Amino acid sequence: MTETAAGIRIRPLDELDISAIVAIDEAISGRYRPEVWERRISYYLRRAPEASLVAEVDGKVSGFMLGEVRSGEFGLEEPTGWIEVLGVDPAQRGKALGRKMAEGMLEHFRSHGAHSVRTLVDEEREDILTFFSSLGFEPAGLRPFVKHLEDRRPG
């Protein structure tokens, strides 16, 4: 898709990227969750295989960004780009991988009729807030609400 300087390449996500994404997630979160990523990646590959991207550094997957264009979410009828999740290998940070993936994803969203892009960010994740702010994202009028459910399973 996009070849950049310093051996960095941005390309569409592929099912063969699952193990690399699992490793990146484990490096970030400290948890090994292959079943989570198999399910998520399968979803995005079925819905919009060219929308989600990975960043390779010298041929090794070092970052990923998953998203798609959807309509009708939360009463928003117009096509809207959604960036759902991103991750960059901590050893590869500082190479603008996130920015390069975001640029590719934003261009994909534009080409598929989206006039806006949304994401949700945990207010405690200052690094993610700073990243999206640097891309021109700003707080929106949508406000997330949550209700925690009690575990009512017997036992």
Image (cartoon, rainbow, N blue to C red):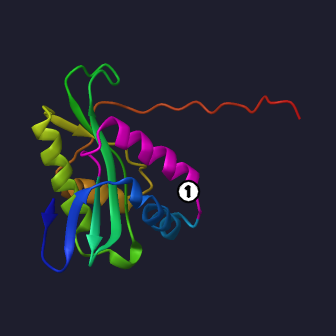
Q: Residue at x 22, y 32 (%)?
A: 80
| Residue that appears at 54% across and 49% down | 36
Q: Position of residue 41 (x, y in %)?
A: 42, 48
Residue 74 horizontal side relative to residue 5, left or right: right
On the image, the x and y values in percent for residue 18 come to 45, 58
Residue 133, image quadrant: bottom left
Query: Per the image, is 77 magenta?
Result: no
Q: Residue furthest front?
A: 16
Q: Position of residue 23 (x, y in %)?
A: 49, 67
The residue segment tinted magenta is 31-52
Q: Residue at x 50, y 70 (%)?
A: 27
Q: Amino acid at mark 1?
A: Pro
Classify 10 Å Cα crowding around label 1: few (below 14), some (14-19), many (20 and above): some
Q: Which residue is mark 1?
A: 34
Residue 101 lies left or right of residue 29; in this view the side is left
Residue 15 at x, y = what percent?
40, 53
Q: Residue at x 27, y 65 (%)?
A: 55
> What type of secondary structure mainly makes up the magenta span?
helix
Q: Is residue 90 above or below residue 105?
A: below
Which of the image's four quarters has the N terminus? bottom left
